[in-house]
Image (cartoon, rainbow, N blue to C red):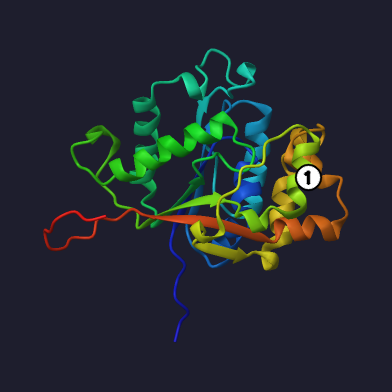
Amino acid sequence: MTAPRSPSLLAVFAHPDDESLAAGGVLAQHAAANTRTAVVTTTWAPDSHRAAELADALGILGAGEPRMLGYADARIPESAPGRPRLCDAPLDDVVERIVKHLREFRPQIVVTHDAYGGLTGHPDHVHTHRATTLAVHAAGLEHLYPEAGAPWHPSALYLATHPHSGVGELGSLLTQVGKSVLSVPDEQVAARVDVSPWLRTKWRAILAHRSEVRRRRPLPAILSRLPADTRQRILATEWYMRVDARPRPGELRELTA
């Protein structure tokens, strides 16, 4: 009997390095199972230095070539010269571009930031969450964005998150450099994934974002300064909230609370 095949997975994250930090273990896990995986990144220009680092990280994770929307980072306008910041771009335009990737790649699972934008609440993370959530629903509706391809219904949307109990040592490390720590109640977490078998791959992908490792405040830099055992405790588990994405036909009935 052959083992069940892992579902195809498309991740949508805001910045180069978010894919490795938030979902690098799951991406490596799916690639190791010979499952189709890919990553859409909403900010930074395709000809920037961070795009090259992203390509290296995705190669390590087995997630294909970069798919970059090319908007500017909210805090770094030079990340995409001449392009609007993601947060300033018309939401409908961002949604349509994500829908195009969903219909082209046809994933069963989509992964993105949670509604807080992860622990730090970066505005680009929050905006990427909103646009991706709308795009997952829109992708299956034939009269929305018809030029973006044939309709496709992903089965589920997973939101990369941290439960209150999972913040641990990372919380104090973030507050020390002036970052927020936004976690969710434990009962809202649907999937707790032990990614320790793929931790070496995940860490190599994080290190591929070399320009972030060389700075002081970004998470790759913070992690690089830690003892290996502390870093392993922080990175070995990934948490996700789950949102059903595929319509489930049933009997018509009254709405109840």
Q: Residue furthest top?
A: 82
Say above or below: 214 vs 32.
Answer: above
Residue at left 66%, top 52%? Answer: 60
Residue at left 44%, top 76%? Answer: 4
Residue 101 x %, y %: 39, 41
Q: Secondary structure at mark 1?
A: helix
Crowding near the residue tagged with mark 1, few <14, some 14–19, many ≥20 C-alpha atoms within 10 Å: some
Q: In the displayed structure, does residue 110 sit left or right of residue 173?
A: left
Residue at left 76%, top 33%? Answer: 211
Q: Residue furthest left?
A: 252
Q: Amino acid at mark 1?
A: Ser
Residue at left 71%, top 56%? Answer: 235
Quarter occupied by residue 239: bottom right
Residue 229 x %, y %: 84, 61
Q: Nearer the viewer, residue 74 or 164?
A: 164
Q: Is residue 68 visible?
A: no
Q: Is residue 35 visible?
A: yes
Residue 24 x %, y %: 62, 53
Q: Nearer the viewer, residue 46 or 153?
A: 153
Q: In the displayed structure, does residue 3 sit left or right of residue 57?
A: left
Residue 119 x %, y %: 63, 43
Say above or below: 251 vs 137.
Answer: below
Instruction: Return the residue at label 1.
Output: 172
